[in-house]
Amino acid sequence: MKFNKAAFGVFITVSLILCVTGNILAQSRIKDIAGVEGVRENDLVGYGLVVGLKGTGDSGSAMFTVQSVANMLVRFGVTVSPDQFRVRNVAAVMVTAKLPAFARVGDRLDVAVSSIGDARSIEGGTLLMTPLYGPDEKLYAAAQGHISLGGSSSDRRAKIHPTVARIPGGSTVEQTLADNSFSLTTNRVTLTLREPDFVTADRVAQAICDRFGEGSARAQDAGAINVSIPDNYTGNIVGFLAQLEEIPIIVDSPAKIAFNERTGTVVIGGSVRILPAVVSHGSLRVQVSEGSSDNFMQLQEGSVVPVEAEDTVDDLVAALNSIGATPHDIIAILQALKACGSLLAEIEVL
């Protein structure tokens, strides 16, 4: 096949990422697609001050920062009026962290630090002791440490968000969760799929029954599987869960296409199929027919690529790429095929 450069101009290739190609089935472990109900991270948040900035902190109009500094100094025996000083070297911040389900007192957690005032940058600052609270308003951790923007001062990428930073291991767990909904003393557990799907849920239940005996598991719905703890694992539930998580599973997923028009990236599930259709888009004509002898895609003067009705959409996109279709062309054609019912997939715009 010859490509007419004069007819189409510069050849542009769309970034194509295949989630699942052809008829290959994706095999995973249960631990990769599901979790145990009640075992989850918990959000923590706190309000604090970053000090030691080089004149890039909050201005005097951020009165909450001025008041916070005044209140902090009182705790150290220094009484000063908020009207008597400026705080250009200080920035008020919100500090967030994730508390793992089985965190112990003394464990270290990463924290994110974000300015809430009008500071220009918090680079080079130090976060003062900041208590971190859970949704129940109880204190679970305390954070303190030097701010890191994730790059050197000469790295341009580090300047993109100079008011957001991280402190690796910057907080210490002070209290564990008192009310954890997950208990290792029960005789049943519930697995929750991260991507609910009826087929996958049924496969998980069947795989568990195959490993531990009939009746060991039952799919409650598309997102949950109830599992009974075998009698021989009553005193070793952790061991049972370890065995459970390693069971291989064939994961099923709906046919789906996602694309980003700004970057020209198209993400296609391998199970996506196309039905017979004809699409005319500018000088580009796409025809998918039942008979393979008449299947073709044509671009202006004689650029023809065969496409059969049983082909997947990744075959279609690859063929469109081969004749120089632009990202906008490909996205428009996929949307048109979906609109007329010839594209058997869900489309998501990123």
Image (spheres, rainbow, N blue to C red):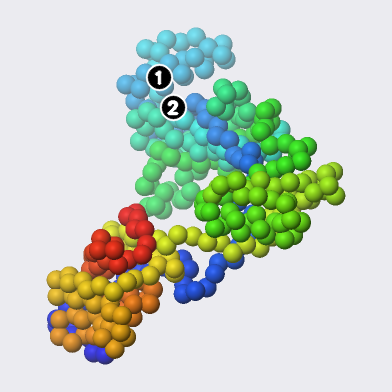
Q: Which residue is mark 1?
A: 64
- Is any atom of residue 9 visible in this view? no
Sequence-wise, which precedes: disc 1 or disc 2? 1
Specify the amino acid type for callout 2: Ala
Quarter of the rendering occupied by the N terminus: bottom left
Q: Quadrant of residue 350?
A: bottom left
| Image position of 205 with respect to 176: above or below | below
| Image position of 344 with respect to 56: above or below | below
Q: CA distance from mark 1 to mark 2?
A: 8 Å
Instruction: Indicate the secondary structure of the residue bearing disc 1.
Output: helix
Q: Residue at x 42, y 10 (%)?
A: 81
Crowding around mark 2 (Cα neighbors within 10 Å: few <14, some 14 to 19, many 20+) is many
Answer left or right for 343 relative to 146.
Answer: left
In the foreground, 263 or 297? 297
| Image position of 263 with respect to 232: above or below | below
Q: Position of residue 302 (x, y in %)?
A: 18, 87
Q: Which residue is mark 2?
A: 92
Q: How many marks?
A: 2
Q: Position of residue 247 (x, y in %)?
A: 69, 60
Q: Residue at x 52, y 73 (%)?
A: 24
Q: Quadrant of residue 208?
A: bottom right
In the foreground, 271 or 88? 271
Residue 177 is marked as none
Tell whether label 2 touches label 1 (CB within 8 Å). yes
| Image position of 142 with respect to 10: above or below | above
Answer left or right for 15 relative to 168.
Answer: left
In the foreground, 115 or 232? 232
Answer left or right for 87 relative to 112.
Answer: left
- Is any atom of residue 21 visible in this view? yes
Q: Residue at x 44, y 68 (%)?
A: 271
